[in-house]
């Protein structure tokens, strides 16, 4: 007697979940871009309170706008840097921080509501419920990290902690990677009902470690405004590394606190990371995947944009495109790593 296919023994809808997760991933990319604009326009401290629910409503009248502006006037950034800013100028920086926070709320709802719906209808494949719940929880933690970052700039400092900013960005990128990897696992499950999760190959693991290290130094560069430390390439001024940029008693903290050191590491670690990513792309080609071609194209583009960002004096549009490309590169690397770690080989087209 014929046994029913596993497809018809479950109510799970892996394809629907995969599509949903790709939409969430797109929203996270938009959030990363808006976060980059928020940082580059020095807008991140314009909202001095964290109201997870009521904060979704912006000031609606002149009195509310003035109250928000008065709160901003009490922090060091305004007193030391933006003295004399007009209400119109405040509204501009408020817009970007508000948009960033609003997107966070939208992403939370876009993840939580469908997840609950799929769970109630028992459409989540076995073994994926815990993973999706963990990603939702990490999103909640990310909101708290965002406020922890902002809070660092509300007293004493005139900007947010570059270390906290780095944690904030890396957490967003980990969420993006987790969402995309899970989406590809679900796509594989849709195509092959008995498919297991893809494994992370050693080459892919090394490539991702190098990429995240480079992304971390990119975040430190942004947090320290280190892109302004030297705006020439390949030399930093007239030398490979500026004389006198290291204090006599330099220690390990220079790697995260010294703008010259951070920029130096970021500009040259890029080529080490590129070597790892190109090796992964080569491995992908060996198993018949074209995702590696995307990785190659994005690596070249990202390095070119990094150089252009320096030479332009960190021009807003160039720097934001650099950050967008970093997110797209991560997605391409995750897709490539997933393909090289797929447990069931995919037949080559005839």
Image: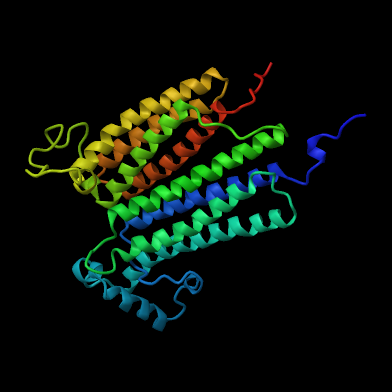
Q: Residue 138: x percent and y percent?
A: 49, 54
Residue 338, compared with residue 309, is above or below; it is above
Q: Give the percent coordinates (x, y) of residue 153.
A: 28, 64
Residue extending furthest toward the bottom: 63
**Residue 230 seen by the camera:** no
State which quadrant residue 108 falls in: bottom right
Q: Residue furthest top?
A: 350
- Number of on-image labels: 0
Residue 318's quadrant in the figure? top left
Query: Colour scheme used in the picture?
Result: rainbow
Query: Looking at the picture, how far across and down is residue 49, in whole percent?
Result: 38, 72
Does residue 292 appear in this view? yes
Residue 247 occupies quadrant: top left
Q: Position of residue 11 (x, y in %)?
A: 78, 46
Left/right of residue 307 with respect to residue 110 in the rendered view: left
Residue at 65 percent across and 39 percent down: it is 186
Q: Quadrant of the C terminus?
A: top right
Q: Split into 4 quadrants, where in the image is the N terminus?
A: top right
Seen from the viewer's position, the closer of residues 94 and 218 is 218
Name the foreground residue: 89 vs 120. Answer: 120
What residue occupies the far right of the structure in this picture? 1
Q: Which residue: 44% across, 42% down?
A: 327
Q: Is residue 50 left or right of residue 41?
A: right
Residue found at x 71% / y 32%: 194
């Amino acid at each position: 007697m014929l046994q029913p296919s596993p497809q018809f023994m479950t109510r799970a809808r892996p394809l629907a979940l995969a599509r949903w997760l790709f939409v969430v991933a797109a929203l996270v990319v938009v959030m990363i871009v808006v976060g980059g604009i928020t940082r580059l326009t020095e807008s991140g401290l314009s909202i001095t309170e964290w109201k997870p629910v009521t904060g979704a409503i912006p000031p609606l009248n002149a009195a509310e706008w003035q109250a928000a502006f008065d709160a901003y006037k009490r922090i060091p950034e305004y007193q030391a840097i933006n003295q004399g800013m007009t209400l119109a100028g405040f509204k501009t920086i408020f817009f970007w921080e508000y948009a960033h926070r609003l997107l966070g709320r939208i992403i939370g709802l876009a993840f939580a509501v469908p997840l609950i719906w799929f769970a109630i209808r028992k459409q989540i494949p076995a073994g994926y419920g815990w993973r999706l719940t963990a990603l939702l929880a990490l999103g909640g933690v990310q909101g708290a990290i965002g406020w922890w970052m902002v809070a660092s700039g509300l007293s004493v400092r005139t900007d947010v902690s570059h270390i906290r900013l780095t944690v904030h960005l890396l957490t967003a990128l980990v969420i993006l990677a987790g969402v995309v990897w899970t989406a590809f696992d679900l796509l594989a499950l849709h195509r092959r009902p008995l498919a297991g999760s893809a494994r992370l190959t050693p080459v892919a693991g090394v490539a991702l470690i190098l990429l995240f290290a480079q992304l971390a130094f990119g975040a430190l560069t942004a947090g320290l405004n280190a892109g302004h430390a030297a705006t020439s390439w390949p030399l930093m001024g007239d030398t490979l590394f500026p004389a006198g940029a290291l204090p006599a008693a330099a220690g390990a903290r220079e790697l995260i606190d010294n703008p010259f050191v951070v920029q130096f590491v970021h500009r040259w670690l890029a080529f080490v990371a590129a070597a790892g990513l190109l090796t992964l792309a080569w491995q992908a080609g060996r198993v018949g995947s074209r995702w590696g071609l995307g990785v190659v194209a994005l690596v070249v583009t990202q390095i070119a944009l990094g150089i252009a960002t320096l030479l332009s004096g960190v021009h807003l549009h160039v720097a934001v495109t650099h950050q967008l490309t970093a997110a797209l590169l991560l997605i391409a690397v995750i897709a490539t790593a997933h393909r090289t770690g797929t447990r069931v080989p995919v037949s080559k087209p005839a």
